Amino acid sequence: MKKYTNTGSKDTRSGFGDGLTELGKTNPNVVALCADLTGSLKMGDFEKNHPERFFQVGIAEANMMGIAAGMTIGGKIPFTGTFANFSTGRVYDQIRQSIAYSDKNVKICASHAGLTLGEDGATHQILEDIGLMKMLPGMTVINTCDYNQTKAATIAIAEHHGPVYLRFGRPKVANFTPEDQKFEIGKAVLLNEGKDVTIIATGHLVWEALQAAEQLEEKGISAEVINIHTIKPLDEAAILASVGKTGCVVTAEEHNFLGGLGESVARTLVQHQPAPQEFVATMDTFGESGTPEQLMEKYGLNAAAIVKASEKVIKRK
Amino acid sequence: MSNTQQLEDFVTQVRRDIVRQVHKVNSGHPGGSLGCAEFISVLYQEVMDRKEGFDMDGKGEDLFFLSNGHISPVFYSVLARSGYFPVEELSTFRLIDSRLQGHPTTHEGLPGVRVASGSLGQGLSVAIGAANTKKLNGDDHLVYSLHGDGELQEGQNWEAIMYAAAKKVDNLIATVDRNHQQIDGCTDDVLPMGNLVEKFEAFGWDVLELENGNDISQVREALKEAKGRTGKGKPVAVIMTTEMGHGVDFMMGSHKWHGVAPNDEQLEKALAQNPETLGDY
């Protein structure tokens, strides 16, 4: 199979921060708002370089979303930064009314998504945010897999008109996508061609999917691996083409199996070409404290879980 | 418009538009709409520096945000009669396929509306955002907003009130419609809000009291005064006392007409008290 190399583990949130730094230099309409998590979101450089375009709103996420909506009136492109939990569930109605329904060009940038937030525990580990955001009409939902992709996505969404939810995380993870890869919203990335099973992964689970594909290869199973960084709009053509070839699919995400990528893929298949599917996701549960690795192991969100799901789904063909 | 008689005629017509809109579809919110007829009319007809036509960005003109979106009948009437869309379109209020949704929205592209509102408590934040952008753009025009008093029970307002003062958003004039009523009864019975003037002042706002928001000359004076206080490092609040249902005697001063439409007979009575001036749609 195609070989991917970790060029040095980095956190995806730094990809966001560096992307924002870049935007600060290239796009004078980009403004940034943060709810007292500048360090966590890596927004410090933007704040330092462009103090007039940085808005510290304090611990007041609802107000931040409203201000961001208002700032689009007059042509600014606001990027809001806080944890995924506080970027979505806490402010759902503000996003729904003032941003999505009002078609405001706000980029909701959410760090510390999912279990890999780690020791802070379930109060901060949101596993429902993709579902919440993808249900909003007009909302684009992106979950990037590594530093390079997060940086590229941050830059790309400034050029896209309309509300965007950009989801990334806290821990250092493998950085393996090409530094110069252009980020195309809504376009799946085929990472490895295979014929026995399709593994569709998003976010931190993409690297795990590649590890799983290597392990499957050793067992004589040929896995196709697709990186779905955009959950909405979903690249249905890429999914249908791949599953049409392999006949079965495993979806992998750091999210509840209810409402996540897996359900979007299942809906696509049911509408067009039904096929067996297994879900690597959390099973309608809250998380807990622990290291990211421990949590991914305990909740079945790693390469081993993807291998197991792949073997199971192939038998169901 | 500077002639008081002309403005009074405008307001009378707006009152007719309000009751006729809600009567036709037997739904909507006449009480608060009637109470704010003078304020929104004076704002659009005399106070705001507005450009011809409508574009979302609103650069180089004053902006207005209606946070208590349920008083859409008065907003729509004033917008239509200020030239944003045909007056005849008021007849589509709350009907299927209409741009005049129950609560204002940008979704159907109605000129004059810049954000959806009606899920209460969100408009002040949006107005602050628009004011921030005006400053970034070097645009010295002002941002106006209107809020219900009951609406201030929503916590987001207090985040926004704190922010606007702390960050010196001094190109903003936020008016609170203090009619002391909300759906379930008097605000003092539902959830007393205490002294709003002192509360805004404690948060660092420059506060004006407008004793009778149903008196055109008082509204004029207060908005002129408020405008004069902008640009001095503090956001400006106008605490405006109004009478819910003003101008229709059987609707006045009661929360019962917050969200109830008049029947045929009541409509006739209301219209008789507000004779046609600019022409019905």
Image: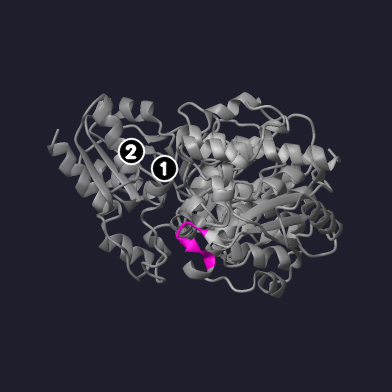
Image quadrant holding the N terminus of chain A, namely: top left
Calculate the distance from the C-alpha at mark 1 to the C-alpha at mark 2. Answer: 9 Å
* Relative depth, front residue between B277 and B25: B277
Q: Residues within 10 Å of mark 2 (few under 14, many from 20)?
A: many
Any part of residue A223 in sight:
no
| Tag 1 and tag 2 share a subunit | yes
Are dots 1 and 2 in contact, CB under 8 Å? yes
Query: Of marks 1 and 2, which one's residue comes earlier in the chain?
Result: 1
Position of B237 with respect to B106 (left or right) is right
Q: In the rendered structure, which segment of residues is drawn in magenta?
A: B182-187
Which label was assigned to residue B213? none
Q: At which x and y percent is residue B162?
A: 66, 68
Q: Amino acid at mark 2?
A: Ser
Most distant residue in the left direction: A315
Q: Which residue is mark 1?
A: A134
Residue A102 on image: x %, y %? 56, 40
Q: Quadrant of the C terminus of chain A?
A: top left
Above-or-below relation of A219 to A53: above
Disc 1 marks a residue whose amino acid type is Lys
Name the secondary structure under disc 2.
helix
Which residue in the protein does label 2 denote?
A264
- Chain for numbered disc 1: A
Nearest the camera: A238 or B110? B110
